[in-house]
Amino acid sequence: MKLSKLIHDAANIDIGSLFTDSRNKVEKGMFFCIKGMLHDGHKFVEEAIENGAICVVHSDELNEAHKDVVYIQVDNVLETLNVVASLFYQQPSHNLTVYGVTGTNGKSTISLALKDIIDHFEPCGYMGTISVEYGTIKRQASLTTPDVIELHKNLADMVSADMKSVTLEVSSHGLELGRVASVDFDVAIFTNLTHDHLDFHGTMENYFESKATLFKNLVKGNIAVVNADDTYGRRLFNLTEAKLVSYGIENPATYMASDIELYPEYSTFTLECYEYKYQVKTNLVAKFNIYNVLAIIAALHQKGYNLEEIIPILEHIRQIDGRVEVIDEGQSFQVIVDYAHTPDGFKQIYEYANSITKEGGRIITVFGSAGKRDTKKRAILGEVSDHYCDMIILTEEDPRGESVIEICQEIAEGIQNTNYSIIEDRYAAIHQAVEIANSNDTILILAKGGDRFMSRAFGHEEWMGDDQAAKDVLHRYYLGEEE
C-alpha cells in the first residue's frame, strides 16, 4: 500500500509491512517506535532499518541519517499505529459485527459461546485467551488481546475467510496499552471487576478506568451489555452513549434469572425480560455461569436474534478445557478443575462446590499463586480458601523463578483455621489430594485449568495440564492401574 494512503501528505512509496519489533526481518517495512514497559523503540531504529524498514514513525527527535528512509515525526506513535494498521488492513473491523467482552472473569466462556452460537446463523470468528478461530482455522493465541498489528491482521484474515462477525476478549492490558483503539465495536459486554492485575494497574480504580475505556468509546447505535449486580458495572451506566441493557440476578435488570437450580452436570433458570418469561437449561454449571449465559442472551437478543432460537442452543455450549471441568474416571468423589485464579473466582467456585458436595463430604483444594504477579492477592486467596475448605494443598503455579515455598508461605498467611500442606511439585500435590479423598468429598484443582505449560525463570516448561494430571493420577493410583 502507498504510504501516502496511510499518512496524509507522506511520500508516495510502497509499504509492504508494519512492525514494532526491530528484530523482525521485513520487506519495505514501516517501523513504529513504540515506548513499551521495558523497551523504547527509538533505541532500535538502526536495527529496524538494517532489517528492512524504509519508513520510521517516531515521536522523539532522531538522527535522520539514512537518505533512503522516510522519517515521520508524530505526537503519539501508538495512536498513529492504530490508525495506520486499520487502514493498511482495509479497516477489517468495519466489515464485521464486533462483540467485545471485558471484565475480570468470564471473558473466554462468553466469547467462545457467542462465537459458537452465532455460527448457527452466520460465520463468526473468535480471538482471545484460548485461541484464534475462524472457519476451519484454529491456532494458538499470542495474548488475550494481541498487539495492534496482529489484531488487525487477524481481523483482515477473518474478512477474507468470509466471516461476518467476530467475538473478542478485551483485556485491561489491551485497553490500557491502546491495542483496540481503532477497532469498530458494535457490542461491548462487561462481566465483573474483582481483584486482579494490580501489579500492572496499581489500584482497583485504575483497573476500572481501563475497562471503562471500552464503553466510553462506544457511540450511539452501539450496544453496551452490563452486569447490574456488579458495583463497577453499575458505574458504567452513565459512562456510555451506547444503548445500555443490563443483566443480573439480584438487582433489577433488563435480563434477569430467577428460580435457579444448579446441578453437577447442568443448570436451569427462568429468564425474565421485557415482561416475558422463558425456561432455560444450559450445560454450563455454577452460579457465575448463569451470569455468563445472561450476558450471551442479552447481547444476541439485542442484535436481533430470536430468543426462541437462541435458548435451545444453550443446552450444548462448547466446554472449555479446565473451566469447571468435571473429571470423572469412576472414582467415588468429585474432582473439578477450574481456571479460577482471583479471590472472587475462588469464592465463586467454592460456593458451587459447597452446593454440590454431599453431606459429610469435604472440600479439598489444590492451588498456588503466580510468581512475579500481583503478590497482594496471595494472602487473600488463602483467606478465601480458609473460609470454605476442609483441606488446602499449596503448590506451584507458574513460579517464574520465585521460590515456590515462599509464595505458598505468603498464601498461608491468610489461612487461620484450615489444615494445609505445601507440596512444591504440582503433580505430587494433585496425587496427595486424591490419596486423602474419601467418598463424597470434592477436590478442586484451581488456577492452571487446561494450560499446557508451567512458566519458570527460563520460560515455559511443558506441563500436562491439571485436567490430564488429575486423570493420570486417578488411573495410576486410585483406580489401581499403576504400571
Image (cartoon, rainbow, N blue to C red):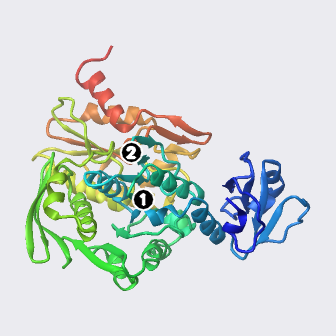
For numbered disc 1, what is the local secondary structure?
A: strand
Relative height, residue 36 to residue 226 (above, below)? above
Q: Nearer the viewer, residue 149 or 34?
A: 149
- Tell me the kind of residue under disc 1: Glu
Q: Nearer the viewer, mark 2 or mark 1?
A: 2
- Asked whether residue 414 appears in the rendered view, the answer is no
Q: Nearer the viewer, residue 360 or 106?
A: 106
* Quarter of the figure with the N terminus: bottom right
The x and y percentages for residue 378 are 44, 57
Residue found 59% across the figure and 65% down from its top: 87
Using the numbered discs, state the Cα–Cα distance from disc 2 to disc 1 in whole angstroms: 18 Å
Residue found 78% across the figure and 69% down from its top: 72
**Quadrant in the picture for residue 429:** top left
The x and y percentages for residue 252 are 18, 79
Q: Which residue is mark 2?
A: 135
- Tell me the kind of residue under disc 2: Gly
- In this rendering, position of residue 47 left or right of residue 252: right
- In this rendering, position of residue 63 left or right of residue 397: right
- Mark 1, residues whose alpha carbon is within 10 Å: few (<14), some, or many (≥20)? many
- Count numbered badges in the picture: 2
**Quadrant in the picture for residue 348:** bottom left
Q: Which residue is mark 1?
A: 169
Q: Earlier in the sequence, mark 2 or mark 1?
A: 2
Residue, far bottom = 238
Residue found 44% across the figure and 51% down from its top: 129
- Mark 2, residues whose alpha carbon is within 10 Å: few (<14), some, or many (≥20)? some
- In this rendering, position of residue 125 left or right of residue 295: right
The x and y percentages for residue 56 are 77, 62
Relative height, residue 174 to residue 469 (above, below)? below
Relative height, residue 211 to residue 401 (above, below)? below
